[in-house]
């Protein structure tokens, strides 16, 4: 009987989705975007008031799962917009051929290093950083070099580039700084690595439970602890070589290109009504103009002396080789 | 005596065999469909399959087998002592609580268990603090093989102990009476009475633990200390999730299946089939009295097991109590996730129990029908084949079905049905081990009599089978429920806004800095699991 209840519920849900497709915009995104404390609820309210339509979020675990869901659904996807991919997923996303060009004006955007792409529109960005526990560590490393060569008893938790976006971020950061010598640097750093977790949450969980005084995260992690918890305990270390940039992106699917609401949303997304919400819900820097000034805590964050980035095509072409290099250096 | 010469369950298949076949068909369909879906997608670009084989893969395979074998040893050997002690002392205070506590690890998401274990053995754990405070120097690092083995033992000692206890419970009371009349020493009792019963169940239990450890993923990566600790499951996950290479994911899954089948096959050769007990028990179940030395030894075994399993759970509870539980329980998201989890666990457990009973009784009828002839393929499939579902990663089943279904229907709308079915099938290997020993020994004792007396169909089920099967069925049901309530693997990929379970919510809180909330949800999960198991066992008749 209960199986049939589930079946009915499933059938009903499927019906409900097709019935109201006319003035509905469906956005696929990641879980923490639509959570109660995430940007989703406020964005939905603001856009629905503007367009007089129904905005529907469908959430999956994270950015990689997002791309996979679209791949799994293929041409039949219900998504008009996919929101939550990043620069490192861009090349594989484009290769699916499921996304359409946007044609919106992106001159108002203020992403470090500038932005021009026909398909993807940025909505926020952040920098990877080593976050440390001030109660366990008085002098954090001042550069990637100091991290690599420092006291091996002061451990760091990192993520696996084979399964996690920040893990891939650190891999690229090391590559951007060390180039061909990256494998030697990894071999040295491996003595300092407490463990390599499958995702960001496990690493951060180990860090906050006191297992290690450092973790790979974002400069904006510090803003969360300052604003939401009123605590200065966890801080990001500023690295003299610069910090690696992550830009979060949205794009229209081919189906969404036919929906008049699609382009409207992308324009809305780059404007203040959306951008105001981002800093203190998604804990990233807004990619467009905001109406309100950012919380003063954001001005206390690490300001990278240099923005490091490797082009999406280069990443896609070399990812396997670089991960293999990482594997052999770390397994030594 | 004509009955003995005329096999009543001969060539003609009875209802039980057909039910067993149907259950087997369901499982085959679930796995087969997924594999077909993956294969159809994989043939579009099969290059990944060949590229999967390199020296890195060899290392991964070696480590997978090494850690799984060691994990099985460190789980099953202590479990033998624990099960024996539990069986010897049937009535001590706290035994019921201990048994229920033993089901909780099954329901804990791996990262929660890992944090609980680290709270004791980690760098910032209790023992490290104690070592520093008493000046004993530095507590050795747990990261590496030792961490993996500790965590796997935490998950699997309780599981193996409960399953072996189930096997010990099938020893006819007459054997115990005889042992005490003959004044057998504890060693002789173990050797002649307990060991044969455990030996029959051991290959199955060890095989199950092995399979669970082969597919371990989060534990291996998180506690393993680095990418040298990588299992095949990680490679499969990477192939499908990051690289979206169905061909490579499929070939790795097939490799994982092949390796596991070989190991399980070897294990089965080590075991022995216990010959059936045809006589009906006339003595009341009574536990053999244990001498003082033995009681002390057993108390030490049980005490250690209780601390080993209980302490990380206590750490999970302590962390959970620091969360704002009142607010959490008031949140609509938490309540609906709790409801989804409960409903899912219930549906999956009912489905799992029905399927398992059909498989077990179908198999037994085949066995009794063939008499002393070697077991046929179907009987073997009904027996061990079903366990192999554990080595097919949930994300493969998920992705495969979506790839297949998307040709015909809206696959994601069917997510709730898929999640319940996959959970039910994944729990079958556990339920089989809980149900089969009792079922088979009851069948041996009662079947001939039932046939002679012409008790059949529903009246047989009600009068003969149900009273003896009630308790093992409840145990199997409880296992299935604990597994499904803690499920994350299936949910992670199917997970949509429609199927949000507690573990899913837990991870989502963790991934947005809300670690205290996550700890609170873990506590809620553990408490509900404990309550559900208590309820299931009460319904099954608690008398023991």
Image (spheres, coloured by chain):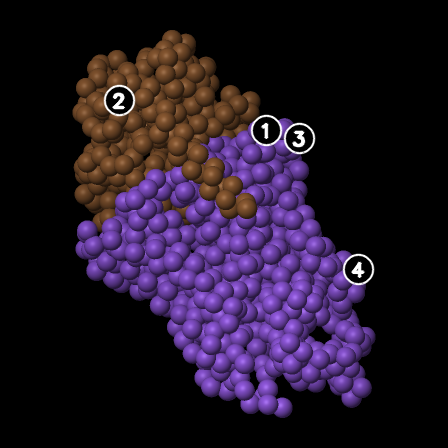
Chain colours: A brown, B purple
Question: Left or right: where does residue B301 sit relative to residue B180?
Answer: left
Task: Same chain for labels 2 and 1? Say yes or no.
Answer: no
Q: Secondary structure at mark 4?
A: loop
Report the front residue among B488 and A223: B488
Q: Earlier in the sequence, mark 1 or mark 3?
A: 3
Give the number of the disc on residue B326: 3
**Closer to us: mark 4 or mark 1?**
1
Give the number of the disc on residue A186: none
Task: Same chain for labels 2 and 4? Say yes or no.
Answer: no
Residue that mark 4 sits on: B93
**Closer to us: mark 2 or mark 4?**
2
Residue shown at 47% from the left, 86% from the top:
B373
Q: Position of residue A87 (x, y in %)?
A: 27, 32
Question: Left or right: where does residue B473 sit relative to residue A77?
Answer: right
Q: Earlier in the sequence, mark 4 or mark 1?
A: 4
**Measured Cα–Cα span from mark 1 to mark 3:** 9 Å
CB atoms of marks 2 and 4 within 8 Å: no
Residue shown at 44% from the left, 34% from the top:
A12
Residue that mark 1 sits on: B331
Report the front residue among B209 and B201: B201
Q: Secondary structure at mark 3?
A: helix
Residue A112 versus residue B529 in the image, above or below: above
Residue count near mark 3 (Cα–Cα under 10 Å), binned few <14, some 14–19, many ≥20: few
Residue that mark 2 sits on: A259
**Measured Cα–Cα span from mark 2 to mark 4:** 67 Å
Residue count near mark 1 (Cα–Cα under 10 Å), binned few <14, some 14–19, many ≥20: few
């Amino acid at each position: 009987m209960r199986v049939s209840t589930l079946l009915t519920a499933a059938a009903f849900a499927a019906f409900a989705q097709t019935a109201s497709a006319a003035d509905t915009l469906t956005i696929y995104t990641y879980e923490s975007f639509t959570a109660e404390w995430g940007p989703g609820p406020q964005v939905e309210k603001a856009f629905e008031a503007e367009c007089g339509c129904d905005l529907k979020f469908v959430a999956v675990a994270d950015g990689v799962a997002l791309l996979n869901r679209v791949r799994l659904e293929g041409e039949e996807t219900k998504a008009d917009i996919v929101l939550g991919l990043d620069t490192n997923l861009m090349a594989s996303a484009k290769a699916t051929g499921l996304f359409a060009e946007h044609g919106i004006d992106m001159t108002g955007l203020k992403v470090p290093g500038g932005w021009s792409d026909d398909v993807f529109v940025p909505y926020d960005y952040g920098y990877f950083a080593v976050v440390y526990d001030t109660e366990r560590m008085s002098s954090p490393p001042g550069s990637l070099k100091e991290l690599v060569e420092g006291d091996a008893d002061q451990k760091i938790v990192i993520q696996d580039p084979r399964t996690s976006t920040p893990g891939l971020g650190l891999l690229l950061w090391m590559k951007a700084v060390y180039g061909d010598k990256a494998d030697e640097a990894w071999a040295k750093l491996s003595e300092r690595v407490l463990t390599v977790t499958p995702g960001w949450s496990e690493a951060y969980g180990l860090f906050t439970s006191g297992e290690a005084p450092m973790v790979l995260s974002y400069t904006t992690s510090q803003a969360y602890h300052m604003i939401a918890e009123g605590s200065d305990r966890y801080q990001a270390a500023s690295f003299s070589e610069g910090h690696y940039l992550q830009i979060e992106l949205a794009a229209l699917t081919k189906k969404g290109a036919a929906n008049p609401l699609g382009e409207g949303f992308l324009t809305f997304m780059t404007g203040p009504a959306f951008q105001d919400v981002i800093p203190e819900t998604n804990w990233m820097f807004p990619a467009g103009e905001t109406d309100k000034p950012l919380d003063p805590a954001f001005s206390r964050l690490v300001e990278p002396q240099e923005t490091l980035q490797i082009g999406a095509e280069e990443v896609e072409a070399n990812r396997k080789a670089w991960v293999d290099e990482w594997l052999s250096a770390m397994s030594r | 005596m004509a009955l003995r010469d005329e096999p009543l369950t001969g060539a003609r298949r009875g209802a039980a065999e057909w039910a067993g076949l149907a259950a087997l068909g369901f499982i085959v369909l679930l796995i087969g469909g997924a594999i077909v879906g993956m294969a159809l997608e994989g043939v579009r670009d099969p290059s990944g399959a060949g590229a999967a084989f390199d020296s890195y893969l060899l290392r991964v395979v070696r480590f997978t087998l090494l850690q799984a074998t060691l994990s099985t040893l460190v789980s099953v050997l202590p479990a033998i002592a624990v099960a024996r002690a539990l069986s010897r002392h049937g009535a001590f205070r706290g035994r019921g609580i201990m048994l229920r506590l033993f089901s909780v690890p099954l329901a804990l998401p791996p990262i929660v268990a890992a944090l609980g274990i680290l709270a004791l053995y980690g760098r910032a754990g209790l023992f490290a603090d104690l070592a520093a405070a008493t000046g004993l120097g530095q507590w050795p690092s747990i990261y590496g093989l030792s961490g993996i083995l500790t965590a796997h033992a935490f998950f699997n000692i309780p599981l193996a102990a409960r399953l072996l206890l189930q096997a010990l419970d099938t020893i006819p009371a007459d054997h115990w009476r005889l042992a005490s009349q003959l004044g057998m020493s504890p060693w002789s009792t173990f050797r002649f009475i307990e060991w044969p019963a455990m030996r029959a169940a051991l290959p199955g239990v060890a095989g199950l633990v092995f399979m669970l450890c082969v597919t371990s993923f989060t534990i291996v990566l998180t506690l393993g200390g680095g990418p040298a600790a990588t299992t095949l499951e990680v490679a499969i996950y990477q192939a499908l999730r990051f690289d979206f290479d169905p061909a490579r994911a499929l070939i790795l899954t097939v490799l994982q299946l092949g390796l596991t089948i070989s190991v399980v096959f070897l294990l089965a050769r080590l075991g022995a089939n216990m010959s059936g007990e045809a006589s009906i028990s006339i003595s009341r179940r009574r536990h053999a009295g244990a001498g003082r030395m033995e009681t002390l030894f057993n108390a030490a075994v049980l005490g250690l097991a209780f601390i080993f399993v209980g302490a990380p759970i206590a750490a999970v509870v302590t962390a959970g109590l620091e969360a704002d539980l009142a607010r959490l329980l008031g949140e609509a998201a938490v309540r609906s996730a709790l409801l989804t989890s409960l409903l899912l666990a219930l549906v999956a457990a009912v489905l799992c129990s029905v399927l398992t009973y059909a498989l077990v009784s179908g198999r037994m009828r085949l066995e009794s029908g063939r008499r002393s002839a070697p077991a046929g393929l179907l009987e073997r499939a009904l027996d061990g084949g079903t366990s192999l579902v554990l080595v097919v990663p949930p994300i493969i089943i998920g992705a495969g079905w979506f790839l297949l279904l998307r040709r015909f229907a809206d696959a994601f709308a069917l997510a709730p049905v898929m999640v319940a079915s996959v959970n039910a099938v994944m729990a079958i290997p556990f339920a089989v081990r809980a149900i089969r020993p009792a079922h088979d020994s009851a069948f041996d004792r009662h079947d001939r009599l039932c046939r002679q007396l012409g008790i059949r169909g529903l009246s047989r089920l009600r009068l003969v089978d149900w009273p003896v099967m009630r308790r093992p069925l409840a145990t199997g049901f409880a296992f299935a429920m604990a597994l499904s309530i803690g499920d994350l693997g299936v949910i992670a990929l199917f997970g949509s806004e429609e199927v949000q379970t507690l573990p899913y919510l837990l991870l989502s809180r963790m991934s947005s800095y809300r670690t205290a909330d996550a700890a609170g949800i873990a506590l809620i999960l553990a408490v509900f699991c404990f309550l559900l198991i208590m309820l299931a066992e009460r319904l099954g008749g608690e008398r023991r």
